[in-house]
Amino acid sequence: MSNYQDKNNNLDEENEMQLIIGRNPVIEALKANKLIDTIYINPEAKGSITLICRLAKEKGINVKRVTESRGASHQGVIAMGACAEYVSPEDILSIANEKGEDPFIIICDEIEDPHNLGAIIRTAEAAGAHGVIIPKRRSASLNAT
């Protein structure tokens, strides 16, 4: 599994609260439509991992296959809860339309550092942007950082 530890090898409290660890907790979170950003699975894990991958695909949740494992007993799966809900570009355009404004959208591509993504989002908010578009893959995801 992926390493969720900061540079000091201590779990950040906010990130720790966003983790859903283990097969049954992840399955229940998926069934309950909890906001999940990414699910990390060990590709060597068997059994209910197939169900988790199917549910994630149905809900459009990114699944990453990783082999490194540290920390808690995770049964081959850890989900990272999303700190915000994603919306479609159509929703962003609708927000601008409701305000009677021309759309102002920031489009990011391959921003890998969550600190940089956070700075872009804060700047977009301050500048009055209606939304920020980030790709589902090859980009930092929304998290506490």
Image (cartoon, rainbow, N blue to C red):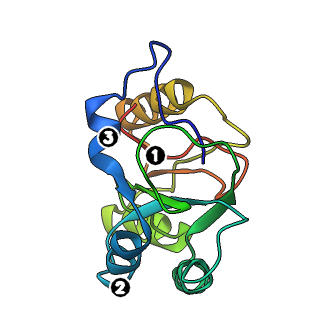
Q: Is residue 24 above or below residue 100?
A: below
At 70% from the left and 49% from the top, the residue drawn is 67
Q: Nearer the viewer, residue 65 or 24?
A: 24
- Residue 106 seen anywhere in this rendered image of the structure: yes
Q: Which residue is mark 2?
A: 31
Q: Quadrant of residue 50?
A: bottom right
Q: Secondary structure at mark 1?
A: loop
Q: Secondary structure at mark 2?
A: helix
Q: Is residue 56 left or right of residue 35?
A: right
Residue 88 rendering spot, x and y as whole percentages: 52, 70
Tell me the crowding category of disc 3: few under 14, some 14 to 19, or many 20 or more residues within 10 angstroms, Cα based.
some
> Looking at the rendering, in which quadrant would you find the C terminus?
top left
Tell me the crowding category of disc 2: few under 14, some 14 to 19, or many 20 or more residues within 10 angstroms, Cα based.
few
Q: Nearer the viewer, residue 23 or 128?
A: 23
Q: Which residue is mark 3?
A: 16
Instruction: Tell me the amino acid under the disc marked 1.
Output: Leu
Q: Nearer the viewer, residue 54 or 121?
A: 54
Front label number (1 vs 2): 2
Of pointers 3 and 1, the one earlier in the residue sequence: 3
Front label number (3 vs 1): 3
Mark 1 and mark 2 residues within 8 Å of each other at the beta carbon: no
Q: Which residue is mark 1?
A: 142
Instruction: Tell me the amino acid under the disc marked 2.
Output: Lys
Q: Is residue 120 above or below residue 95?
A: above
Residue 79 rendering spot, x and y as whole percentages: 45, 59
At 47% from the left and 28% from the top, the residue drawn is 5
Q: Is residue 48 above or below residue 17?
A: below
